[in-house]
Every structure is written in C-alpha cells, then in structure tokens.
Image (tube, helix red, strand yellow):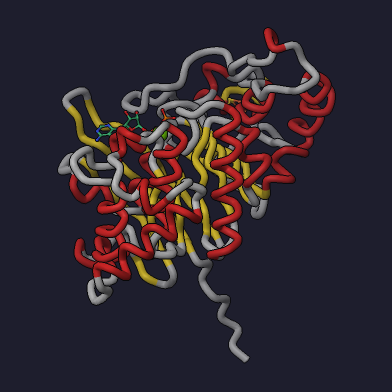
C-alpha cells in the first residue's frame, strides 16, 4: 500500500501573474493556491478586475502570447506541470484536454467560417486521423447535444446568423467537441437573458455529469455559484481572500468582503428596487495596492484589531475553509451572527 496521496486532478500552487505596463506593474494574480477534482465544479467570484479571467487564461497558457506577462508558480493538470511546459505541449492540451467557453462568442468565433466548419476544425486539430465526414458527423452530433434545432442545416450557418443563446450553445459545442477534462466557463451567460441563462447553465451541468469534466465557473453572480459550485474561491485585488466548500461559504462566510458580496445577492423575498446593494467603495488599483489588507479602505471592521489591517497583509489560512483576515475567528463569528446575518 502506498502512503503517497495522489495529486488532485488540477492543482495550482502559488500562481502569480504580473503585467508590465507603462504605468507600472499590474499585480493581476498573487500567490493563488487551489485544487479541483474531476467531475467537480469550482466557482470563482469577485468584482471586476479582481483577477478571475487572468487566472483562467494562465491555466490555458494564453499569457504565452503576451510579451508583457510574467507567470510563476505551478499548475499541475493531471500530473503534468504547465507553467514550465513547452508551448507545443500546452497548445496540444488547449481545446483538447482543457477548453474554455468565453463570455462573448462573437469575438471567439470566426466571422468568415461557418459554425460547423469551426467545430470540425477544432475536432480535427486534436484528431488529425479522423475523416472529414466523421468530423462533420461529430460536429452535427455536438450541435444537437447542445440543443440546436435542425443541426445539419445550422451547421452551414455563420455565427452572426445565430441568436445570442444559440451562439453560446454553438461555442459550448465547440468547447466540448474533444471531451475536455477541464472546462473553464468565463461569465458564459452574462450577455444572455435570464431564461436562456438558466438553460445554458443546465446544459453545462448536464454535459459535465455526462463527461465527468472538472469545471471552473467564473462569475459575478453568487446565485450561479450557489447553484452549480462544489467549491468557491472569492478573489479580491488579485488574491484569494476566502476559499472553501460552497455550502460552508454560504452558511458561514468568513471574510468581510464575502459578507458584502452575499449582501448584494438578489433575493426572491425582497423588492426588486432594494435587491442590489453592491459593496461600498471601489475596487483597488492593482498597480498601487493598498498597504496591509487590500480591502481595508472598504472594510467596516478595519480598525477593530489594532493597526494590523493597515500594515500587514493577511495570509490565507485555515485548511478546508480558508480566509485571509486579521480578525480572530471568534470575533468574526460574533460579528457575522450579530451584525451581518440578520441583514442578509
Ligand atoms: N495584458 C494585460 N496587460 C495589462 N494588464 C492586464 C492585462 N490583462 C489583464 N490585465 C489586468 O489584470 C487585472 C485583472 O483582470 P481580469 O481580467 O482577470 O479581471 P476579472 O476579475 O476577470 O474582471 P471582470 O469581472 O471584469 O471580467 C485587471 O486590472 C486588468 O486590467
Ligand atoms: S484584515 Fe482587516 S481590513 Fe482586511 S478584511 Fe479583515 S478586518 Fe477587514
Ligand atoms: Mg473577466
């Protein structure tokens, strides 16, 4: 019997991404640590500019085409390390073992090729020996699977001939054509109306169960996370500030920023007009991050524990449910129970 614990399917260690710009160094992602098992869904939430997309692009190796990007740390996918892997190896994985559904299918799909031709191409890049006819059958089958009516006719349409929801379905078909083991969905439904959003999310969930893929779901919407995610990362200023199982995070959120996010979640029993109370204040500059805890300018509890929030950067600690905040756990539990939970 071996005592060595197998590596999780995806394991990210100290992932750090910097962009050099004329204005200074953008600290887009700082020392990110997380893992994900096959068949599970990880939700990544946080405000605009918190580093969600940069995290996922780094997993896919897309920073390799950006000369101003510096990436360090380790990304283990199925026992293969990707930060130091060759461009060729990473390209071979992209669109195959790992693929991505982007927010805007129009910009991700080519205007001059038919939707079908693009799915065929995506398939044949990774399966060069497959005949054109078989690839076409596979593409039509995928279009049917994602719920596109008359798939063999729609195969010959261009992306602009599809409605928004249909385009998103076609992009999902393209992302899934090679049975990816890791699927990253970056705000896959933001551009769609609520009914279509729900259909697309159901579709991703069904296909995930069928293919047993690991899914990373990036979203502003905690409702989506509550519905789909097993685990959650909350990002702020390029860092993970809370990480845990979705159930724990929703029942016992630990970080004051997460409390703010939960407070901004729409609830069915509230009037629409007071549904959204976003966290007060603005996101930090990633070039000049605030000293100490990056959240301190917006945190109502920053002064409660001496000056530490202003001077020391809190480290993510706590095992399965981890949080980066200087307040002692008992004090946070008390604040949550007495001041926060009654207003959620
Ligand atoms: N190529 C680049 N050069 C310089 N800065 C960049 C580059 N790409 C991203 N950034 C910066 O990195 C930071 C994190 O961006 P990211 O796209 O990950 O945010 P996000 O959390 O996905 O936000 P949103 O919710 O708006 O999609 C932002 O400040 C962004 O401007
Ligand atoms: S470390 Fe301080 S400023 Fe940061 S979240 Fe905790 S209490 Fe607020
Ligand atoms: Mg983004």
Q: Measuring from the top left, give residue 33's x and y in whole percent.
A: 49, 52
Q: In front: 265, or 172?
A: 172
Vertical relation: 220 (above or below) 207: above
Position of 170 with respect to 128 (left or right) is right
Q: Measuring from the top left, give residue 261's x and y in whole percent.
A: 62, 26
Can residue 313 be seen from the camera position used here? Answer: no
Position of 173 with respect to 90 (left or right) is right
Position of 237 with respect to 254 (left or right) is left
Q: Quadrant of ligand 1?
A: top left
Which residue is rendered at x = 43% and y = 57% of the image?
142
- Check the image and name the residue furthest to the top: 273
Quarter of the image with the N terminus in it: bottom right
Can residue 104 be seen from the camera position used here? Answer: yes
Q: In front: 26, or 326?
A: 26
Vertical relation: 219 (above or below) 180: above
Residue 93 appears in which quarter of the rendering? Answer: bottom left
- Check the image and name the residue furthest to the bottom: 1
Q: In front: 186, or 8?
A: 186
Q: In front: 102, or 176?
A: 176
Which residue is rendered at x = 46% and y = 64% of the image?
181
Which residue is rendered at x = 28% and y = 68% of the image?
133
Position of 187 with respect to 58 (left or right) is right
Quarter of the image with the C terminus in it: top right
Vertical relation: 19 (above or below) 263: below
Q: Measuring from the top left, give residue 28's x and y in whole percent.
A: 35, 36
Q: Measuring from the top left, give residue 96's x and y in whole percent.
A: 35, 63
Count of labels shown? 0
């Amino acid at each position: 019997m071996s005592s060595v614990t197998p590596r999780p399917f995806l394991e990210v260690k100290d992932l750090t991404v910097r962009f050099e710009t004329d204005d200074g160094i953008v600290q887009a992602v700082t020392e990110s640590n997380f893992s994900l098992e096959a068949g599970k869904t990880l939700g990544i939430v946080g405000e605009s500019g918190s580093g969600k997309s940069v995290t996922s692009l780094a997993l896919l190796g897309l920073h390799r085409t950006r000369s101003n990007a510096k990436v360090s740390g380790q990304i283990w996918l199925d026992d293969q390390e990707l930060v130091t892997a060759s461009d060729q190896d990473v390209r071979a994985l992209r669109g195959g073992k790992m693929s991505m559904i982007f927010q805007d299918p129009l910009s991700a799909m080519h205007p001059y090729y038919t939707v079908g031709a693009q799915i065929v191409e995506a398939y044949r890049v990774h399966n060069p020996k497959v005949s054109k006819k078989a690839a076409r059958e596979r593409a039509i089958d995928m279009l049917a699977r994602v719920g596109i009516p008359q798939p063999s006719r729609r195969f010959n349409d261009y992306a602009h001939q599809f409605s928004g929801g249909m385009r998103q379905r076609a992009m999902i078909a393209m992302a899934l054509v090679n049975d990816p083991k890791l699927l990253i969905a970056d705000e896959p439904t933001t551009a769609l109306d609520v009914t279509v959003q729900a259909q697309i999310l159901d579709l991703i969930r069904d296909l995930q169960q069928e293919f047993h893929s690991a899914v990373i779901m990036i979203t502003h919407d905690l409702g989506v996370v509550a519905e789909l995610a097993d685990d959650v990362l909350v990002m702020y200023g390029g860092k993970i500030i809370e990480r845990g199982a979705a159930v724990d995070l929703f029942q016992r959120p630990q970080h004051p920023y997460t409390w703010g996010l939960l407070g901004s979640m729409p609830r069915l029993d509230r009037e629409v007009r007071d549904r959204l109370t976003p966290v007060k204040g603005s996101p930090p500059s990633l070039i000049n991050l605030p000293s100490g805890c990056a959240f301190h300018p917006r945190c109502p509890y920053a002064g409660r524990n001496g000056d530490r929030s202003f001077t020391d950067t809190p480290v993510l600690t706590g095992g399965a449910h981890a949080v980066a905040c200087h307040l002692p756990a008992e004090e946070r539990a008390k604040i949550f129970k007495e001041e926060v939970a009654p207003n959620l």
